[in-house]
Amino acid sequence: MQLNQKNEPTDTLNAAGTTGRSTAQASCTLADVAKALETDGLGYSAASREAYLRALRRHTRITGCRAETISADPVALDSQAKQIAWVAHGFASEKAFRLHWAKVIGPAKRLAGRNSESAAANKSDAWRQVAAAITELPLDRDVAIAMRARWASLSRMATRFEIATPAEFDAARVLQIAEAMDTKRQRLRENVVALNRLIEMREHHEALSMLPAHPVPVPPQRPRQLIDWDALPHALNAELERVLDCLANGRATGATVMATVTLTDVVQTANTKAFERQKPATIQLTRAAVSWSIAGQLACGRQASDLTSLEDLCTPLAAAQAAEAQFARQQATGTYNPTSAGPYQYTSILCRLATRFYVVDASTGEQWKRLLNALRIDRDVGKIATKHQKLLDELLNSRRMQRAWLTLDQRAWDAAEALRRRPTLTRSERREMVQIAEFAVLMTILIRTLPTRLATLPEITFRGEAPFLRLPRARGDNAFLDLPPKSVKNARRMLVEIPEESLAMIRGYLKHFRPIALEQPRVAAWLRAQNQTDCDYLIPGISAGGRRSRSSVAMLVKRGLRAFGFTGVTTHVVRHFMAQLLLEADPNAIGVAADWLGDTRRTIETHYRISDARSAARHGRKLLYGDSDAR
């Protein structure tokens, strides 16, 4: 076979099998050959036609062609492929194979070429007309842009699944597409919803008449398979028993455990999005922890036959003995490196995972506690992240940054008010004004009320059955921020009084800026789709219930902090920054800082520096309370 650089057959003959000229032929599939055999007959009996189709399928498989595309050059086969082809197909000679090939492929290719050209022209015109009609529909600009994007995605799917016109979107075809695009099922659902919305608008434009007459059924969502947490330890134990059996019988070594231990079949898809994101990392860490723990214990002198069950790996005593032995050996030889990924480190990871998968009773609780302390495992309770420590020190050591932070909400509010007082604003300026006002409200809650978590900010409601933000109903009443236990670290309920300056900002936002936020195209379109005119959330959006998503709030806070001179600062840093400022202002305010962070007094004493220096206390008290007479 004459091959080009990509090892693909080169067409040197035309469909009739004659030499001397090379013509570009349309691609021909087995379906085209079958249709040509059925329509024209070509002198073959029914049995011969079936035999010939089977021979063609076998030819494509033997010669390496694509599964559904037949090469247009049967004669330009090399000696080996040529011999395989006609002998395998049952032909007496190469000449007989060549004649049969040309007799069938010629009419089939001509038929396929005509059909493909006309179908492509009709298909492109139909989809193009509907795309042009979308721009003339009475839609909002943002809705029209989103609709055109969905329609473009639908047209790409139509090209892939050979849907000639939009009207061919029937129930069977949609379900077929859903099965073929299992990984993009949610995107397909959104596209079909957009298609059904266009179907409802058929009377607005004549070009939409080519859409289906009835709504297309939305592909169903597959129920997620839940984790059987009760059966997980038993499945993990069975998997480790298999690996340990291989070790004990000499069929594997500690170096090959990494490849043999797998928990993919054990940990199935969880019912929460958070665990889905953590699943690959969890599986990888568990594999590494189990394998390196076995390897580490083997390196510490334990025999493979001694490791008989999961308890030998996950009990505190066994893990502690292996870790301590390895740690002592490394210290004695001077090879210990805290940052190295050795058996000691992976044993600590194993212990961390074991606490997640197993319930520790009271008898082993103290052993676990000593082990965790010995392994220096981060308990993640009020712990200042190492990557933020430098930035936090810069904030705490700069009085200018501290003053700028404590006045950040007021400066942002003044900027929003300055934009509101302008006589005319463009659409982008109105959007910027609302974003600055939202940032100011979030910052006044973050700074002057309590250093809350970022996940809590989008969930703040100001009305409803149990609002987070309780505004005063009568003159003289106070405003409170009432956070339920599920929104606070360590599941504590927080009831915090809101200062007057923060309450003034919140009321101004509700009066002047929030109505503009509700009129933004995306929010207004979402409310109309839900048959609502307003929502209960302080910051409106298009997520569940009408709130802003966490990612959008995080981006809003990040951009606002950067715009006002706090590059790199996150709400995680803010929590520790405010707690440290409070402790520098008043070393006796440990209880207040613990309530702020949802931690214990012991945690605050452990992880925060509490200075008794009068200068630090006087400086912090002046910043926080405006006490200029503090001495």
Image: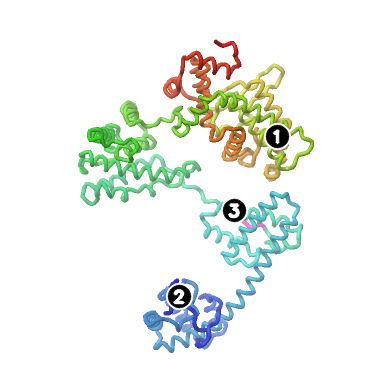
Q: Is 582 above or below relative to 459?
A: above
Q: Gap between marks 2 and 1, in whole Å?
A: 66 Å
Residue 189: which disc?
3
| Badge 3 density bin: few <14, some 14–19, many ≥20, Cα 10 Å | some
| Badge 1 density bin: few <14, some 14–19, many ≥20, Cα 10 Å | some
Q: Gap between marks 2 and 3, in whole Å?
A: 43 Å
| Location of mark 1 (residue) | 514
Q: What residue do we see at 42% from left, 22% from top?
A: 606
> Which contiguous range is marked in magenta?
215-219
Front tag of 2 and 3: 2
| Badge 2 density bin: few <14, some 14–19, many ≥20, Cα 10 Å | few
Q: What residue do we see at 51% from left, 48% from top?
A: 223
Q: Is 137 above or below relative to 115?
A: above
Q: Is residue 5 magenta?
A: no
Mark 1: amino acid:
Arg
Q: Is residue 548 left or right of residue 73?
A: right
Secondary structure at badge 1 equals helix
Question: Which of marks 3 and 1 precedes in the sequence?
Answer: 3
* Quadrant of the frame with the N terminus: bottom left
Q: Residue 549 at x, y = what percent? A: 59, 39
Q: Is 232 above or below relative to 92?
A: above
| Nearer to me, 440 or 279 | 440
Front tag of 2 and 1: 2
* Label 2–label 3 contact, CB within 8 A: no
* Label 1–label 3 contact, CB within 8 A: no
Mark 2: amino acid:
Asn
